[in-house]
Image (tube, rainbow, N blue to C red):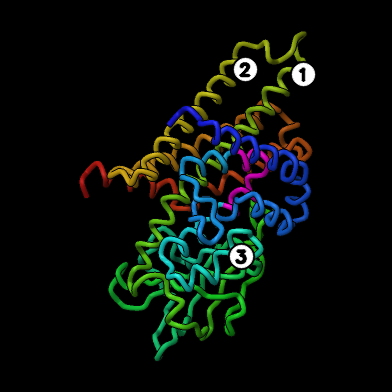
């Protein structure tokens, strides 16, 4: 688990090169201009990053969750916002690959795995966040069609994606009445709200997705009617690992910046790196990241093996890694003093980007609830 194979080392090196050369030099500009770099995502697709843990039959890379967390950490060192969108796209690809039939997989996966087409995941609704089983978007069956009505909130990639995996209510039976339905971007009645004005994640679009009598074939359903909630939760287990890895990448970027800054900044007659109190803080920051990384790798291994404790481990890892990444980035900003507050140093951008990781893919409070209920046997 903790020793990389030769293939994994080569994979990490290739992703690091991509992040260093294609993401990092542009991250500040994309953030400032709110630019979603679709052409760079297609380059990522050519590297196999559009279907990281999808099967190879339709263009996936066939890698493990343990490989994926290493990939997302390296991507996030370059740009946490773009790394996070690639994670969301991979969740969509995995759901289609894992639960789609042969026709659905053949139609969507070849273009999604190359990222020539992008995917979005539609679960959250206005007024319905953590209580996912209470969603109200409806899919009424009329003959061989579903007619969708409702609104989805905070959807990454909305307006740019070619396909939306939509969790919709097909029966009034709680979580068992939710189905997963593929809605193509050109479906009549599908529209989008204005771009959300966000604290961070400026380089990816976030909008409402609105369904007004949207007709799609029943054949667009993933799995059986009522399987949607289970599909959604399965996707979130992996998504939690990915977003934890993105937090570690952003935190590592911020730690590296802090070390470099303290080596060159002088005060009170010597470089700040020689001040014991600051060395202690750097050491604590490194330990936070290493401890979270170790738990994240353990959780990824458990998910790969289908271990009984995979779900609580994914929740633990998500909570610990997203907290660690944000706290390290925020500490790095403090160590930079006033310069950390300036955009040119890149630290404030990472702080803004990482903050939302403690909210999405299940809030960190919900992660604690998952772990607590597992302990209580609930």
Disc number for residue 111: 3
For marks 3 and 1, give the CA distance.
47 Å
Identify the residue position indicated by label 2 in the image: 278
Identify the residue position indicated by label 1 in the image: 264
Going from N to C along the chain, the mark reached first, 1 or 2, is: 1
Q: Identify the residue shown where x is 59% and y is 85%.
A: 188
Going from N to C along the chain, the mark reached first, 3 or 2, is: 3
**Residue at the left extreme, as displayed:** 377
Q: Identify the residue shown where x is 46% and y is 48%.
A: 240
Residue 346, horizontal then vertical, whole percent: 72, 38
Label 3 Cα crowd, 10 Å radius (few <14 / some 14-19 / many 20+): some
* Of the pair 257 and 4, the residue shown nearer to us: 4
Q: Is residue 79 magenta?
A: yes
Residue 320, horizontal then vertical, whole percent: 45, 37
Residue 71, horizontal then vertical, whole percent: 57, 42
Tag 3's secondary structure?
Answer: helix
Image height of 162 relative to 268, above or below: below
Disc number for residue 12: none
Going from N to C along the chain, the mark reached first, 3 or 1, is: 3
Using the rendered image of the protein, determine whether residue 229 is visible from the camera's viewpoint. Answer: yes
């Amino acid at each position: 688990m903790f020793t990389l194979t030769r293939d994994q080392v080569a994979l990490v090196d290739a992703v690091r090169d991509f992040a260093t050369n294609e993401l990092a030099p542009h991250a500040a500009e994309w953030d400032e201009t709110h630019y979603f770099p679709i052409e760079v995502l297609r380059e990522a697709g050519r590297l196999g990053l559009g279907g990281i843990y999808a099967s190879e039959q339709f263009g996936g890379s066939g890698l493990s969750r343990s490989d994926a967390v290493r990939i997302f950490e390296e991507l996030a060192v370059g740009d946490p916002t773009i790394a996070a969108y690639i994670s969301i796209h991979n969740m969509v690809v995995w759901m289609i690959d894992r639960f789609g039939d042969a026709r659905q997989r053949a139609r969507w996966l070849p273009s999604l795995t190359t990222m020539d087409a992008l995917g979005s995941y539609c679960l959250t609704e206005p007024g319905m966040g953590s209580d996912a089983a209470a969603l109200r978007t409806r899919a009424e069956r009329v003959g061989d069609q579903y007619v969708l009505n409702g609104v989805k909130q905070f959807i990454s990639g909305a307006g740019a994606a070619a396909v939306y995996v939509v969790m919709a209510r097909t029966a009034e039976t709680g979580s068992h009445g939710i189905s997963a339905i593929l809605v193509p971007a050109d479906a009549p009645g599908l529209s989008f709200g204005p771009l959300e004005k966000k604290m961070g994640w400026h380089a990816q679009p976030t909008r409402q997705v609105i369904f007004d009598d949207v007709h799609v074939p029943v054949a667009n359903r993933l799995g059986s009617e009522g399987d949607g909630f289970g599909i959604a939760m399965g996707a979130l287990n992996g998504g939690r690992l990915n977003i934890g890895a993105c937090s570690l990448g952003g935190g590592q970027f911020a730690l590296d910046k802090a070390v470099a800054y303290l080596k060159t900044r002088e005060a009170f007659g010597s470089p700040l790196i020689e001040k014991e109190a600051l060395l202690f803080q750097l050491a604590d920051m490194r330990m936070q990241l290493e401890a979270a990384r170790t738990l994240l790798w353990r959780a990824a291994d458990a998910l790969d093996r289908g271990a009984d404790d995979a779900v609580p481990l994914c929740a633990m890892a998500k909570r610990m890694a997203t907290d660690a990444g944000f706290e390290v980035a925020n500490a790095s900003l403090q160590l930079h003093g006033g310069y950390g507050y300036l955009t040119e140093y890149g630290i404030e951008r990472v702080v803004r980007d990482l903050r939302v990781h403690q909210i999405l893919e299940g809030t960190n409070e919900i992660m604690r609830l998952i772990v607590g209920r597992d302990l209580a046997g609930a």
